[in-house]
Image: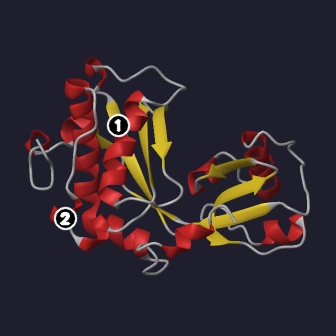
Amino acid sequence: MVAGSSTENTATQGGNFATRVVASHEPTLLSTAATSIQTGLAQEKPAAVNPATFPDDLAAQCGSFVTLEKEGRLRGCIGTIQAYRPLIVDVSENAYGAAFRDPRFQPVEQQELEVLSLSISVLSPMQPLSFGSEAELLDQLVPHETGLLIHDQGHRAVFLPQVWESLPEKTQFLGKLRIKARLPETHWSASFEAWQFQVAKTKSAKIAETTSDNGNGPGHSP
């Protein structure tokens, strides 16, 4: 299965890993993301971070999403579903990506920093779901808690749990996810696969108020 390897990484310390990381290291995650965006504006590259200088949880392999908002509207979002690098590196790279590489938006400009806010979603390891019908799959979804990755016929797509806020019905949630995967809204086949995950999300913070030491504090490479 596509996402099965995610359960083999260091982040498999338990389902509460993501929650623990956010509770213990939220300021560091937010400042790292903000610093990477400011570094991107100055140097056209993400801030370099040395995982060895961070706590073990932040050096563990884990997926994340960084979301930017401008006056309450989405301004960029880039993330990693399959964990393959240290979380703190993932956050730095995804923050840069959200600001400058999201194909839906123009790159962030310096004058926007005063009004841009960011948040970070830390993902738990992917867990494959077992089902024999769409009804059995839907029964396993928990609105506002379950993140979902689907895959079939070479197509895949993912929704974070936050999407439940705009798509509260299970059938609608799954249907729109299939559309995102470029499949028919009611598509079903015997080869349909799905994985669930949970997310722990940081608070939303203004970029201009979040960076510390101009990105040259502990853990950041000049």
- On the picture, is 1 further left or further right than 48? right
Disc 2 on helix, strand or loop? helix
Residue 88, quarter of picture = bottom left
Task: Tell me how far mark 1 sits from mark 2, CA to CA.
Answer: 21 Å
Front in this rendered view, residue 132 or 119: 132
Residue annotated with mark 2:
52
Please give the name of the residue rendered at 42% of the width and 72% of the height, measured from the top-left corner: 11
Does 62 appear above or below 13?
above
Residue 207, quarter of picture = top left
Quadrant of the rendering where the C terminus is positioned: top left
Residue 44 on image: x %, y %: 27, 26
Front in this rendered view, residue 61 or 147: 61
Observer-side mark, 1 or 2, equals 2
- On the picture, is 214 further left or further right than 179? left
Residue 160 on image: x %, y %: 58, 53
- On the picture, is 169 further left or further right than 189? left
Disc 2 residue type?
Answer: Ala
Please give the name of the residue rendered at 20% of the width and 39% of the height, measured from the top-left corner: 209
Does 10 appear above or below 191?
below
Number of marks: 2
| Lower sequence index among marks 1 and 2 | 2
Disc 1 on helix, strand or loop? helix
Residue 42 on image: x %, y %: 19, 25
Residue 206, quarter of picture = top left
Residue 203 on image: x %, y %: 36, 53
Please give the name of the residue rendered at 70% of the width and 66% of the height, measured from the top-left corner: 1
The disc label shown at residue 96, or none: 1
Disc 1 residue type?
Answer: Tyr
Front in this rendered view, residue 201 or 29: 29
Please give the name of the residue rendered at 83% of the width and 73% of the height, measured from the top-left corner: 131
